[in-house]
């Protein structure tokens, strides 16, 4: 019994060690280095926008708590926007916009699935399922075979991205 418990404990530690999470400090250093390479020497404060919700850089505890729940492989996009490119006079902070996968509401999933199927008939859009590119010959078949109940998150913009619920378990 002791061996079984210790084995479970070791498996838990391995899983925790290999599950990569977002890290605020690493992101800030990365974007400061990027700003330095293009000649922006003055360090400005960041405004984090995480799935549409703004967080001031001073709210580091809130940002870190949100980041602790986000796996790196579930991040859709990370965009850095300089304040002078936004064109808003009251915005004096650079933006770090992060979009990640989350369980969508059924109404939004249904609307996005219908839009994705319509777009796939008109155009030859790229299709990603659980972060993996679906070959061109199989795209329409895979998209039509998707069951509404197995979808966790779907978006259809320049390409169609689908995450299934079983990815959430991993």
Image (spheres, helix red, strand yellow):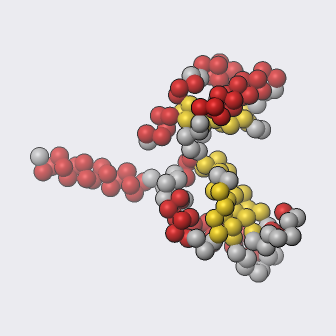
The image shows a total of numbered marks equal to 0
The answer to whether any part of residue 117 appears in the image is: yes
Task: Give the vertical position of 154 relative to 17 (above or below).
Answer: above
Pick the quarter of the image with the C terminus: top left
| Percent position of residue 157, x then y | 76, 38
Task: Give the vertical position of 48 relative to 124 (above or below).
Answer: below
| Percent position of residue 76, x then y | 64, 47
Q: In the image, 152: left or right of 3?
A: right
As drawn, which residue projects farthest toward the bottom? 42
- At x 56%, y 70%, the residue is 60
- At x 65%, y 19%, the residue is 144
| Percent position of residue 35, x then y | 75, 72
- At x 12%, y 51%, the residue is 2
| Percent position of residue 151, x then y | 56, 31
The answer to whether any part of residue 37 appears in the image is: no
Q: In the image, 125: left or right of 21?
A: right
100 or 11, which lies in front? 100
Quarter of the rendering containing residue 102: top right
Quarter of the rendering containing residue 37: bottom right
- At x 45%, y 53%, the residue is 19
């Amino acid at each position: 019994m002791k061996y079984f418990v210790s084995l479970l404990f070791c498996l838990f530690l391995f899983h925790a060690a290999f599950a990569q999470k977002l890290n605020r400090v690493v992101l800030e250093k990365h974007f400061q280095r990027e700003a330095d390479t293009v000649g922006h020497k003055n360090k400005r404060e960041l405004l984090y926008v995480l799935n549409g919700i703004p967080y001031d850089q001073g709210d580091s505890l809130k940002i870190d708590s949100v980041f602790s729940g986000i796996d790196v492989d579930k991040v859709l996009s990370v965009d850095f926007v300089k304040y002078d490119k936004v064109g808003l006079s009251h915005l004096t902070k650079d933006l770090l916009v992060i979009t990640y996968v989350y369980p969508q509401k059924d109404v939004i999933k249904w609307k996005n699935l219908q839009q994705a199927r319509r777009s796939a008939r008109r155009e030859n859009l790229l299709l990603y399922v659980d972060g993996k590119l679906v070959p061109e010959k199989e795209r329409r078949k895979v998209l039509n075979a998707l069951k509404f109940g197995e979808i966790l998150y779907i978006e259809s913009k320049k390409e169609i991205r689908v995450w299934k619920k079983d990815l959430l378990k991993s």
